[in-house]
Amino acid sequence: MDHTHFAEHYKRDFAKWHLESLNVLYVAFTRAERGLYAFCEPPPKNQDAMYGTASKLLFQYFDQEQPEGWDSASMVFRRGNLSIKHRKSNQALTALKGYPTFKWSTKLTVRKTGKAYYDDEIEQQRNEGILLHQILSEIIHWEQTAEVLDRYQNRMEITLEDRDRYEILINNLWQNELVKSWFDGTGEVKTEVVVLPKDGDTKRMDRVVIKEDHATVIDFKSGQPRNEDNRQLNEYATLLSEMGYKVQGYLLYLKNGEVKNG
């Protein structure tokens, strides 16, 4: 790096790294209250091999300055006396004749559940569902579909092939006039709405459209219909009702465009 166009930046960063190391060394050496033991790796014959280490810095200092308390033969520096106080205990001590150890992996087994762990295709579908949620959260008006997809492609979050596939899927959703009405830009649109209920269990609503005292909550689903879906939607509707809104809830299954009234 010393002989490249980046030499100046490299030397500046290298100096900052050394300064940070010195700061850490200072903190370590100034926090002791009664005494300090420091163990440093002896310098190798090839001094350059330890260039920049705290050990080399300390050994160079002792070797050059020869401070009182430094023994070059044993390479040990001592200063002052540390009195050792032994606490008396009435408890009997038991000497250990051995200390058995073992590998935790031979005693414990981490259980992996869920078909997705074993099925890459299901995991891919899950990730695509998450991404589709994110894309829809950025579409306020349905006419913004191409613009939002272009942003994701330009940020290299999706490929051109992915973009075309998502565009077809989303445009199919607009064939349903009810779904299209949630994305016509009217009313106050809130996406990824985080609500903290009284029980402290955070809820996240995919899309809420507020028009005066009416609130429409839409919960996107990227998988197959489950009984739990309705329960979740009802929880969202109850929370909005407690806020004083007249609520209508819908489940939107993204893969096939199916809409269920909650």
Image: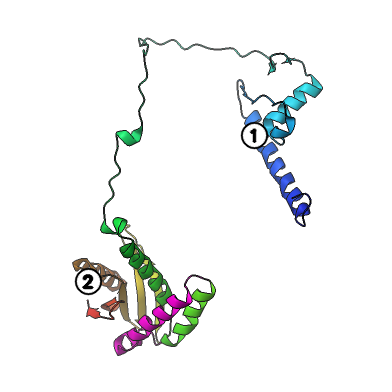
Instruction: Tell me if mark 1 has few (under 14), some (14-19) or many (20+) residues whose alpha carbon lies within 10 angstroms of its own.
Output: few
Question: Identity of the amino acid at label 1?
Answer: Val
User: Residue 123, percent across and down?
Assistant: 34, 62
Residue at 72% x, 13% y is 73
Q: Which mark is residue 157?
A: none
Q: Is residue 244 visible?
A: no
Chief secondary structure of the magenta span?
A: helix
User: Residue 92, percent across and down?
Assistant: 35, 9
User: Residue 173, percent across and down?
Assistant: 33, 84
Front residue (pair 130, 50): 50
| Residue assigned mark 1 | 27
| Residue assigned mark 2 | 225
Label located before the other in sequence (2 or 1): 1
Residue at 27% x, 46% y is 111
Question: Identity of the amino acid at label 2?
Answer: Pro
Residue at 67% x, 39% y is 21
What residue range appears in magenta? 156-184
Q: Is residue 124 visible?
A: yes
Front residue (pair 236, 253): 253
